[in-house]
Amino acid sequence: MESYTMIGFSVFLGAIFVGGAILISKMLAFRSPAGQRKVQPYECSEDPIGGARIRFKVAFYIFALLFLLFDIESLFLFPCMKIFKAVVTQQAGNISLSVLFTELFVFVFILFFGLVYAWRKGVLTWE
Amino acid sequence: MNPLQTNTLYPVQNSIGDMVREIFPASAVYINGFITIISLLMLVSLLPVFLIWLERKVAAHFQARLGPMRVGYHGLLQSTADGLKLIFKEILKPEGADTFVFFLAPILPATATFLVMTILPFDHHMQVADPAGGVIYVIGISGLSILGILLAGWASNNKYSLLGAMRSGAQMISFEISLALIMLLIVMVTGTASLREIVLSQQGTILDWWIFKLPVLGSIAFIMYMISSTAELNRAPFDISEAESELTGGFATEYSGISFAMFFFAEFVNMFVSAGIATTLFFGGFLAPQIGIGFLDSVLDFLPGFFWFFLKTFLIIFLYMWFRWTFPRLRVDQLMYLEWKMLLPANILLLMVGGVFLALGWIL
């Protein structure tokens, strides 16, 4: 519990440190008079054409979904991995190693099947 | 050698910590915590200065030139001067940018990297916090820096920024998976997720470090960790998000002054953090590299733990810099191929094989 208190402090102090550095710099920084050219978004010195919030490849979205899937997988695998050694050395009480191993295998197999499905669907190929 | 204790009441145990505990027994925990966090902040603000100098020097010597030589001894103060210059530069905000998000974005990655550093075990008693789920904490917090980059790209109102941020986001989230799975392998074989206990599980000689202790798997896992973390750091050969020739400056195109410095800062501290975690997981963290000969071991043990931690970490950082000048840049499709079709299946296989090895009792 003490560790999490310290992490809370660090969040606070770290944010103050970084935000403070930016604030101090804002106060110290040199300012030049504003003008049309100065605030223009950088587009290699041309006048920007259209807005910048353009549509982009849908593949980014699909990869984000896949990431979500596998990141949650690693999170769900975590408790299983944490007790694995204790189960092998029989310090975890009444959990049978074969049950744990079967469960792990089935879980990972389903996810692996998902990956194979995505692969066969062709979404993993970047064009 | 006496095995080190796994449980201690206070993370800080040195003369300053003892003194504080004597003078203010009731609030010693908080004062000590405050002191450690402040000293870590000092380290964090000095590290990028040194790392940028090192990066430039290493790059220069790889190309048979000298690099920065003018400011200070062998250019040691060059990056300090650059940093000072950036502080006095104006922060420009492009037309149509989302003001709040634009200024929030550089704070996120810088704070997140600092937060990961709080749980790095620099020495046996030199660690700000040691949560029981340290590995999960590392995975979770390093996700925040991706958020900062995506926000920066979206808020800048610039096409290059947006495309650079999307590319770099896709790349970082992809490689984050294999990074997490490799860390899970170590969690599986150690049976603990606290970084300090992972280090303490590697006590003994060099052969007890996880890179050697896991038969074959250890070195494979380390190589995969290096590949994934280089990609996670957006460093060459995986630096498509900042490919100058295609995207000008990537997500940081519109940033100037201290906001830009914060992204840079986060990048270099992140490099240190990745190398530090590699040290912790595979190279025995703060433990001295003992070789089993009594006399030599006592000499090595005489040096403090943080010396060994920094030595190993900087060796791995040198490896990252070496990669940059050795491998050509990958295309974006090659990058996705590498992660989703090679590293991820290999990772799952590694995890399963590790489980089988452990169940058979080959690793204990």
Image (cartoon, rainbow, N blue to C red):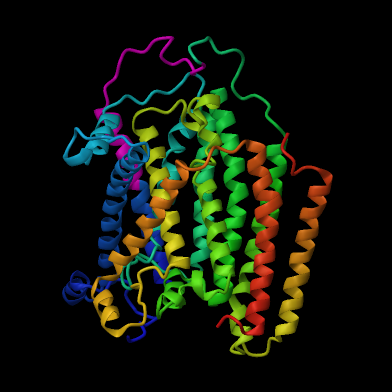
Most foreground residue, A98 or B254:
A98
Q: Is residue B308 left or right of residue A114?
A: left
Instruction: Give the vertical position of B114 relative to A45 (above or below).
Output: below
Image location (x, y in percent) of residue B173 = 60, 47
Q: Is residue B75 left or right of residue A12?
A: left
Residue B334 location, quadrant: top right
Image location (x, y in percent) of residue A114 = 79, 56
Query: In the picture, which quadrant includes the C terminus of chain B?
Result: bottom right
Q: Is residue B105 visible?
A: yes
Which residue lies at the image location 51% right of the left edge and 20% below the top edge? B96
Which residue lies at the image location 42% right of the left edge and 43% below the top edge? B267
Image location (x, y in percent) of residue B286 = 35, 69
Q: Residue furthest front?
A: B64
Image location (x, y in percent) of residue B179 = 57, 57
What range of the chain is rendered magenta?
Answer: A16-43
Q: Is residue B237 left or right of residue A22?
A: right
Q: Is residue A106 left or right of residue B154?
A: right
Most foreground residue, A18 or B304:
B304
Q: Number of numbered discs present? A: 0
Is residue A26 on the magenta stretch? yes
Query: In the picture, which quadrant includes the N terminus of chain B?
Result: bottom left
Instruction: Give the vertical position of A91 relative to B152 (above or below).
Output: below
Which residue lies at the image location 75% right of the left edge and 81% below the top edge? A99
Which residue lies at the image location 45% right of the left edge and 61% below the top edge? B277
Instruction: Give the vertical position of B14 relative to B118 (above or below).
Output: below
Residue A4 location, quadrant: bottom left
Is residue A125 on the magenta stretch? no
Q: Is residue B27 visible?
A: no
